[in-house]
Amino acid sequence: MKIAMIALSIALLLASRGPANAAAASPTIAPTGTIVLPRNGAHDFDWLAGKWYMTFKRLRHPLTGTHDWYSFDGSADVRLLWNGGGNFESGRLNSPLGKIDYATLRTYDATKHEWSIYWVTAKGGLGLPPEVGSFDANGTGRFYCWHDTYGGHPIASRYMWTPVGAPHHYHFEQAFSTNGGKTWEVNWISDVYRKPD
């Protein structure tokens, strides 16, 4: 039943977004007079397809100035959608506070050249708004939600993906900011390792 509710939430979200592979934006002209084509990032998450083992460190009380972290692990299965223009991740986190069944939907907007990342849990439902961003030329992805909330207070949040030992090891961090992104406090750290086929 929980999986069905997650699938229904995601199906409704996809229906509201429309086609994922919209037409690309027009080229721009750089100050030197050369034409700069927008970067196509539709396949930037292709590496994530497959099965993963994950380790986590989580800050117990974010935005309180404390440094009490706890650790746990989990696993995930990621499937590509729309020829790489999206992906669907389902998994379980073995948190000491209770197991968390979750799903993540990532969709690519070819017009804006941005990814949107939606987090869903069986218990908490669909988290909105999404984190939105892109990868740079070095393979680091930064995704932001500038109008998020935590504990009833407005914050900005950031996801960051870094290739550590690509394609078998990646690093993820979540951070919060209470001053519009001037400073960030990391509160969730994950290392993901590809499972052998």
Image (cartoon, rainbow, N blue to C red):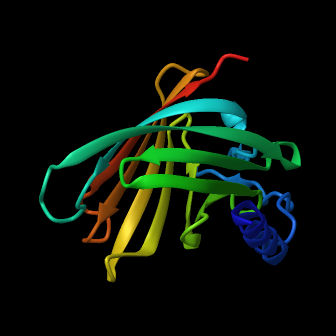
Q: Quadrant of the C terminus?
A: top right
Image location of residue 106, percent across then percent down: 68, 54
Can the viewer see residue 53 in this picture? yes
Q: Position of residue 79 (x, y in %)?
A: 77, 41
In this view, the residue in front, 43 or 90, is: 90
Extreme residue toward the bottom, this view: 152
Q: How many marks?
A: 0
Q: Residue drawn at (85%, 62%), measured in percent from left and top?
A: 22
Residue at image position (55%, 30%) is 53
Q: Quadrant of residue 83?
A: top right
Of residues 87 and 142, the one drawn nearer to the viewer in this rendering: 87
**Residue 32 seen in the current view:** no
Task: State the image quarter where residue 75 is shown.
Answer: top right
* Residue 21 percent location from the top left of the image: 85, 57
Image quadrant in which the N terminus is located? bottom right
118 relative position to 188: left or right: right
> Would you identify the image quadrant in which residue 105 lies?
bottom right
Asked if residue 183 lies left or right of residue 108, the reply is: left
